[in-house]
Image (tube, rainbow, N blue to C red):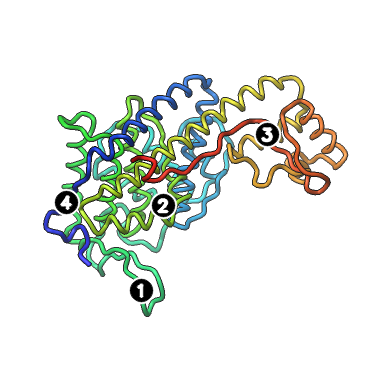
Amino acid sequence: MRWNWQQDDWPTFSWDVPRLQKAEALFLEGAGIAIGVSKHLDEADRGALTVELMSHEAIDTSAIEGEALDRDSVQSSIRRHLGLAGDQRRAGPAEAGIAEMMVDLYQRVGEPLRESTLHQWHRLVANGRTDLAGIGCYRTGGDPMQIVSGPLHRPKVHFEAPPATQVDQEMARFLAWIEQSGPAAALPLPPLTRAGLAHIWFESIHPYGDGNGRIGRAISEKLLAQGLPTPAITGMASTLLAHRKAFYAALERGHGTLEITDWLLWFAAKAIEAQRRTLQQIEFVLAKARTMDSLRGKLNARQERALLRMFAAGPDGFIGGLSAANYMAITGAPPATTTRDLSALVGLGALLRTGEHKATRYRLNIAVDPLRHLDITDLS
């Protein structure tokens, strides 16, 4: 098989512009809604939401690569880099590195994408690694860079990147295109097309020894934000994690062709889904503010702690709902007190109760519209 970079017209990608018009319009419309809803958040809630979205992105982009990070450590590190109050928890090198990368990404989202930025992101992604050579620089020499799976005696090659000797030239051409296709260009590309094309192009070059996936997704996030009237977090990683197998399959198909309409439509569907997930989180934060305001002066310290912990779990809530055992673990309350506290929260309308006896569970009394997965057919 000839990979895209081995074809005569590389890197002249092509796509069907009219087939992407609906997706581009939906994305800009969704951004406007999210920005409008965000204006109803107060400063504290806006800061908390920013930390939540950035930490989700950091944790989920790492999870796509099979790396599990400590959520509290990531959040603490992000808050520290943003100058926000928080605990003095000591983060591990992986958590500290990806947190700093996310803060750098969003604080400098409007700045041009330069080679120095990518090298810095690579150093942060590889923070604490002792098994990786060439940290903070493009790969050099060695065996072909391949993405493989299966047993050692019969590996399946999903992709082979250009030789290391070509990487400098390929990345210079890529970064020049990024600059020439942005909002300030004479003929700027719309955000979904630009971000989706950048992602498949960067992953095709695969310029680093490791960390290309996380850096490639950061590039996409940056370009999506640059294409909006007011830069905003799209939050692609959580959605790509939910579709991880399909994501890798779409990338593999894209690596074999320069006609990338199908890849761009797949990417666009997931970007719009991610945007809707982020809007759901914004609306959830607003619902939290309304709920806590309506309960002001009516809760004891235990009840308030439990409610805040439930809100911290996000729109998806506690898996399976809050049990009496969960409540006791969160608050330290004995069984009889737990029963009274939970009954009172139901009476106040803060919680909904389902089930009986040991199967009793409690959920926040907040209506959250289920998030519907999107695919290419939704954009046709």
From the top left corner, tell me how far across and down residue 67 is, in percent: 48, 56
Query: What residue does disc 3 label?
Result: 364
The numbered disc on residue 11 is: 4
Residue found at x 64% / y 46%:
319
Q: Secondary structure at mark 2?
A: loop
Q: Secondary structure at mark 4?
A: loop
User: Mark 1 and mark 3: span between their CA atoms?
Assistant: 48 Å
**What's under tag 2, amino acid-wise?**
Asn
Is residue 13 in view from this perspective?
yes
Which label lies toward us, 2 or 3? 3
Query: What residue does disc 1 label?
Result: 155
User: Mark 4 and mark 3: span between their CA atoms?
Assistant: 51 Å
Q: Quadrant of residue 164?
A: bottom left
Query: What residue does disc 2 label?
Result: 127
Earlier-in-chain disc, 2 versus 3:
2
Residue found at x 36% / y 54%:
211
